[in-house]
Amino acid sequence: MKRSHRPRFSLPARLLFLGLVLAACHADGAGDSASGNSAAIRSGTFGFDDGSGLHPDGWQLGTSNRRKGSADAVWERLPDATAPSSPNALALTDARGHYGQAFNLCWTSAVSLADVDVQVAVRIDGGTEDQGGGPAWRVGGENDYYAARWNPLEDNFRVYSIQDGERRQLDTARVRADTKSWHTIRVRHVGDSITCWFDGQELLHATDTTLRGPGGVGLWTKADATTRFDDLTVKPAPER
């Protein structure tokens, strides 16, 4: 009986093929865990549980309007049994020397979207001049992005555009919430329309054309606010 001929591949070739298949599945699958040093993906959740110590590999730090001689804030993955997806949370732990209009940003370009639905859990750690924070999106660099944040010192929830380090308020709502608990901020930005939720309540609406193109996602605080974050989830937001 004549046997059919099957081409044989070397072990390195087979391993390379398997790696490409797995990478494709990871990048395209909604809800997958996302790695900070991966290629651009369409959706994912950053739980910050992979490793410990300083901010995740591949993430970038930046500070708008930093005072001369001051360094970027320190961001660390900390053990936190209270975090929505323990054991870790990502925390800004040290913003000494940051005052006034200093904006602290930790972001990744692993996700690059314009129309985006982003959500993150937030818990207050401290801050004398400022407290709180929230997600950033359409991030083009440390001076250009959108941000939504909760500030318990002011009892408000606001959304901003930041361009060339200049912040412009787009909408505000009054919010009073327990500073010892985790809270959820969600943002949906499609075209020039922005909607923001705090703990599931739709509170902010804005129309803005400052930054139109796709960008990364990240986390934001102001001045000396020390804050921790968990479960940064991002996905495309198609038009309704």
Image: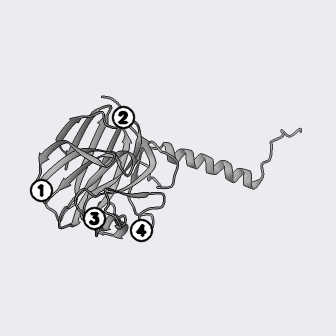
Residue with the mark numbered 4:
54
Residue with the mark numbered 3:
98
* Residue 71 visible to the viewer: yes
Counting residues from the N terminus, which is met first, the one under dot 3 or under dot 2? 3
Q: Residues within 10 Å of mark 4 (few under 14, many from 20)?
A: some
Does dot 1 land on a helix, a strand or a loop? loop
Residue 21 image position (x, y, % from top left): 60, 46
Residue 158 image position (x, y, % from top left): 19, 47
Does dot 2 land on a helix, a strand or a loop? loop
Colour approach in the figure: one colour
Q: How much space separates mark 3 and mark 1, taking CA atoms?
A: 19 Å
Residue at 44% x, 63% y: name it. Answer: 50
Closer mark to the observer between disc 3 and disc 4: 3
Counting residues from the N terminus, which is met first, the one under dot 3 or under dot 4? 4
Amino acid bearing label 3: His
Q: How much space separates mark 2 and mark 4, taking CA atoms?
A: 31 Å
Residue with the mark numbered 1:
154
Residue with the mark numbered 2:
212
Residue at 80% x, 47% y: name it. Answer: 8
Amino acid bearing label 4: Leu
* Residue 87 visible to the viewer: no
Badges 3 and 2: C-beta atoms under 8 Å apart?
A: no
